[in-house]
Image (cartoon, rainbow, N blue to C red):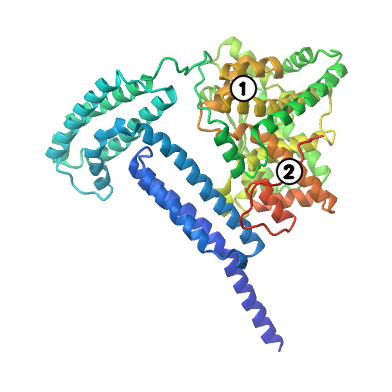
Amino acid sequence: MKRLISTFIIFLTICSVSSANEMVDIINTFKADKNALRGTYTIKESEEYYQRFFQFYDNWENRIKEIKFKDLTPTEKVDYVLLKNLIEKEGYLLNQDYKAFEEVASVADFTEILFPFIQERRRGKQPDAKVLAQQFKKAEEIIQTKIKQLENDKFQDWLIAEKAAGIVTSFQQGLKEAYNFYYAYDPDFTWWMESPYKSLDEDLTKYSDFLKENYSKESIKDDGSGIIGKPVGRKTLIRNLEYEFIPYTPEELIETAEKQFEWCKQEMIKASQEMGYGNDWKAALEHVKNTYVEPGKQPEAIKDLYDHSVDFIEKRDLITFPEMAKETWGMIMMTPERQKVNPFFTGGWEISISYPTQGMSHEDKLMSMRGNNPNFSFPTVQHELLPGHNLQFYMNARHKPYRSVFGTPFWMEGWALYWEINLWNKDFPRTPEEKMGMLFWRIHRCARIIFSLKYQLGEWTPQECIDMLVDEVGHEYANAEAEVRRSFATSYTPPLYQLAYMVGGLQFYALRNELLEKGWTEKQFHDRVMQENMMPVSVLRFLLENKEIPEDYKASWKFSTDFK
């Protein structure tokens, strides 16, 4: 009898494992299929690319509908909702891009005669080089005609012009790849195509440059800051917030940030008074900026701050730090080029330290040192290492790694920012200078919500954003400029990225408070979060509170926006 029971238990375990793996395999297949298609259809600004990915997302929407939601386990239901949301989000963003593509696709009519060459290259078909040379020549003639036509028909604004130029550049890159596949390997191809390719490639560069500048002069591309971004508008912001399960409008988030901004300002005045500067918090901030260490000493200062934060957290038993995580993090120095868009250190598997290099001007060296003084760095070392990004990376590689596809800055940056809030409430800073350092970054994150949303709504220019960071937060000008450039002029930061720090942190803090009221310890909460991998916090809430998530779950959790 005991043997029969044991056999039955083993059978149930096998069935349970099989069921639990179903959504994992589906998610992994989605991710692998998408990566495979991206590796094949590399000309992203082309009709071929858009149509293939429309088909991809349509197929996956149908596949999701075939899954019997009611038969899934609670964990599988969460994964189902996450995958369904991701498919809808990526399909929506693809459609937004395609609308912009359609508007100017005619600039690349000439590609129709050359696209078969690129497609057939994927399977190694030997081209008729003599015919292909003639087609390249024909494409050049079409381009010249296009330029003459468009000189008197300018695009409405610089955003449309950028899209048009991007279509040509995308095709040019695909053409180069196909050409290099045959060049020097196929003698006939090389003999016929070397000169036509070089000539067409030069024309494509000229054409792209022409398109980029062929817009109405009433459209202002550069407000004088030299930072060129692309505001997405209110409608797209709201859709993106919905996909992140954030039930607040941009205006509500700005209002929340402004209230928090004022709280930070009052706390900075208190710290200023402790330092002997009265209500002149800006004077106190200047004093703190000048506490920088000498060149060459910054890595040691970072290590000291790391040791203090880990010791502080472990003494209070707030979270589990695996010994290997403490053993394997590393340091690198940030390059001067990267410091132009990120003037402060960053973290992950390693901490990247931003500090002056030999080739910088004297003024830039001082701004870098002042902006990375130990008191400013005090709250952010743990943000980048343990228990922030380094621990996130470490644990994500070991717990439910399939969920990496659901990555969101509200989880990644929100978790690290949450620790700044939590540690402040535990009297983490030891001196008024360290308080000022923590408050400087807290108010900076409030400012990020305000300036990034106002920019994306089309209300502020990049220069106004820079001025706010200098005048209202206390940034060095070069650091403020780099911060705004990083926010709007790089692929690193999508529209919601900058507000995700504080908003994600508030979500984690609200969830923490809910669970502590239900009898959880902080350590239980923190360890569990690190074991679930990435996802929007409101979805994580269902897992941690052991609640069934609805199949059609939409943003509804009105988490507290009070961080005190």
* Disc 2 packing (10 Å; few <14; some 14–19; many ≥20): few
Residue 103 place in picture, x, y as percent? 38, 33
Tell me which corner region of the image, top left, top right, bottom left or bottom right, holds residue 297. Answer: top right
Q: Amino acid at mark 2?
A: Lys
N-term mark: 1 or 2: 1
Asked whether 232 or 175 is in front, the reply is: 232
User: Residue 558 has which mark?
Assistant: 2
User: Residue 236 has which mark?
Assistant: none
Check the image and report above or below for 408 versus 70: above
| Placement of the C terminus among the 4 image quadrants | top right
Residue beneath disc 1:
355
Q: Is residue 171 left or right of residue 331?
A: left
| Residue in view at x 60 percent, y 55 percent | 81
Residue 95 place in picture, x, y as percent? 45, 42
Residue 375 place in picture, x, y as percent? 75, 24
User: From this viewpoint, is residue 321 visible?
Assistant: yes
